[in-house]
Image (spheres, grey):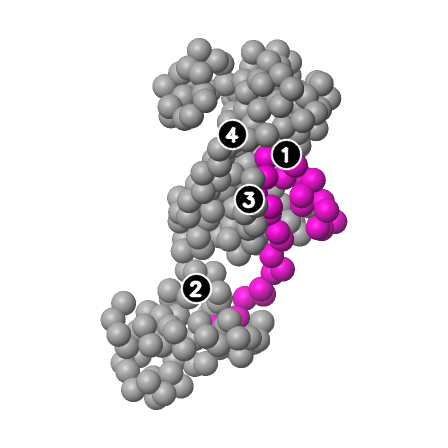
């Protein structure tokens, strides 16, 4: 992206952030921006294509570009003692969780190189897709230590909250010994599951989950959040 395109992008993004451009209303036409910035039409088109991939706008063939509906962001407090389901249900009545994958993790899986994961443990993956207002918003993968829950394979398809499952089995107090956050763009599989554009950033959170009283590792967790659906709060310990 050259200097002219950056100038157009900054102008349009400022209008989006300041709500100068309204949801589902038509954005400035290519012709208007060509005249305003005195640039070739291809540069305006490149900027609009970028904003569409970033998830800000959408196109209607032969009509123009329009502002996407800006959804309310839900707060995610980065703690290990409250379940994701509980955090969401405290903020919206339109939340659901669907189990998308259950399988035993093979020994060569990269998860076994993660902190506090004992290679001698058998891990079972339970993957859930989290929906907010009927739209996919997060992928949640729990790598559960099978030795602590012999019935996990039979119960896994019915689990929507791992914390509720743990509490049912006598584990009521939890903590994480570490949390690692990074920003990444979605893979092809992520885009399919989350229904997002290729340049919508995701926040990837990796952590572990321990039972406080027994000091037992319950699971290793990976969560992918759409950044256009959540805001994040980091608390000091």
**Which is in the foreground here, disc 3 or disc 4?**
3
Query: Which labelled disc corresponds to residue 236?
Result: 3
- Mark 2 or 1, nearer chain start: 2
Q: Is residue 78 magenta?
A: yes
Q: Which residue is mark 2?
A: 52
SS type, badge 3: loop
Q: Residue furthest front?
A: 237
Query: Which labelled disc corresponds to residue 177?
Result: 4
- In the picture provided, is 12 more to the left or to the right than 77? left
**Which is in the foreground here, disc 1 or disc 3?**
3
Between the C-alphas of marks 1 and 3, the distance is 14 Å
Q: Residues within 10 Å of mark 2 (few under 14, many from 20)?
A: many
The reply to whether the C-beta atoms of the residues labelled 2 and 1 are less than 8 Å apart is no
Residue 18: image location, x then y, percent: 53, 75
Between the C-alphas of marks 2 and 4, the distance is 39 Å
Q: Residues within 10 Å of mark 1 (few under 14, many from 20)?
A: some
Query: Which labelled disc corresponds to residue 81?
Result: 1
């Amino acid at each position: 992206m050259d200097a002219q395109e950056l100038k157009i992008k900054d102008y349009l993004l400022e209008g989006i952030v300041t709500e100068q451009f309204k949801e589902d209303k038509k954005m400035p036409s290519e012709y208007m921006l060509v005249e305003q910035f005195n640039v070739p039409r291809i540069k305006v088109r490149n900027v609009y294509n970028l904003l569409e991939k970033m998830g800000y706008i959408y196109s209607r063939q032969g009509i123009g570009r329009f502002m996407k509906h800006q959804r309310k962001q839900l707060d995610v407090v980065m703690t290990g003692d409250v379940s994701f389901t509980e955090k969401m249900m405290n903020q919206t009545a339109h939340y659901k969780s669907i189990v998308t994958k259950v399988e035993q993790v093979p020994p060569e899986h990269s998860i076994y190189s993660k902190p506090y994961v004992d290679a001698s443990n058998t891990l079972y993956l339970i993957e859930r897709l989290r929906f907010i207002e009927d739209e996919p918003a997060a992928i949640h993968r729990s790598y559960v230590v099978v030795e602590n829950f012999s019935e996990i394979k039979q119960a896994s398809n019915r689990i929507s909250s791992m914390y509720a499952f743990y509490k049912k089995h006598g584990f009521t107090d939890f903590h994480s010994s570490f949390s690692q956050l990074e920003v990444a763009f979605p893979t092809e599989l992520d885009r399919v599951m989350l229904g997002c554009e290729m340049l919508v950033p995701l926040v990837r959170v990796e952590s572990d989950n321990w039972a406080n009283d027994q000091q037992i590792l319950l699971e290793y967790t990976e969560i992918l959040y759409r950044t256009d659906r959540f805001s994040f709060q980091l608390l000091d310990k």
